[in-house]
Amino acid sequence: MHVKTVVVDGAVAYLGSANWTGAGLGAKGEGRRNFELGLLSRDDLLLDEVQAFFDAIWCGQPCPGCKLRAECPAPLG
């Protein structure tokens, strides 16, 4: 999965594949473009899920079972 998310004030969430660069937002040049998909939502249940997913990763929840832990530049303790 390759997705970006932005949550604003816990009230609105964007989920999508576009990089937030000129190229990702369609400024690559004439005849060249990326095809991306995204959604904007104010759904409370979706916001809760997205924020919980982010928090789990930020706090290192998947780290103990990760098979790439030795490769991690700064493994969480």
Image: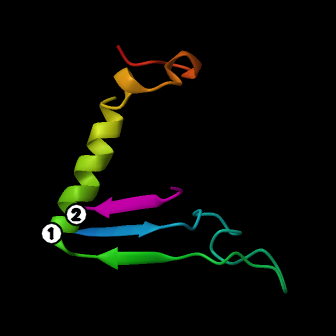
Answer whether residue 29 is magenta in the image. no
Expressed as whole percent of the image width and height from the top left, the position of residue 31 reads 84, 86
Expressed as whole percent of the image width and height from the top left, the position of residue 13 reads 31, 67
Way the structure is coloured: rainbow
Which residue type carries mark 2?
Answer: Leu
Q: Which residue is mark 1?
A: 44
Q: Which residue is mark 2?
A: 47
Q: Nearer the viewer, residue 61 or 43?
A: 61
The dot on residue 73 is: none
Range of the magenta residues? 1-9
Q: Residues within 10 Å of mark 2 (few under 14, many from 20)?
A: some
Q: Is residue 62 left or right of residue 45?
A: right
Judged from this view, the residue extending furthest toward the right is: 30
Q: Is residue 30 left or right of residue 61?
A: right
Q: Quadrant of residue 40?
A: bottom left
Disc 2 is placed on an element classified as helix
In the image, what residue occupies the spot 23% across and 48% down? 52
In the image, what residue occupies the spot 54% across and 15% down? 70
Disc 1 is placed on an element classified as helix
In the image, what residue occupies the spot 28% across and 76% down? 41
Name the quadrant of the C terminus: top left
Q: Residues within 10 Å of mark 1 (few under 14, many from 20)?
A: few
In the image, what residue occupies the spot 84% across and 85% down? 30
Q: Is residue 14 left or right of residue 45?
A: right
From the viewer's perspective, is residue 46 above or below residue 36? Answer: above
From the viewer's perspective, is residue 71 above or below residue 35? Answer: above
Expressed as whole percent of the image width and height from the top left, the position of residue 59 reads 30, 31
Does the residue at mark 1 contact the one at mark 2 (Cβ under 8 Å)?
Answer: yes
Which residue type carries mark 1?
Answer: Asp
Q: Quadrant of residue 10?
A: bottom left
Q: Nearer the viewer, residue 63 or 14?
A: 63
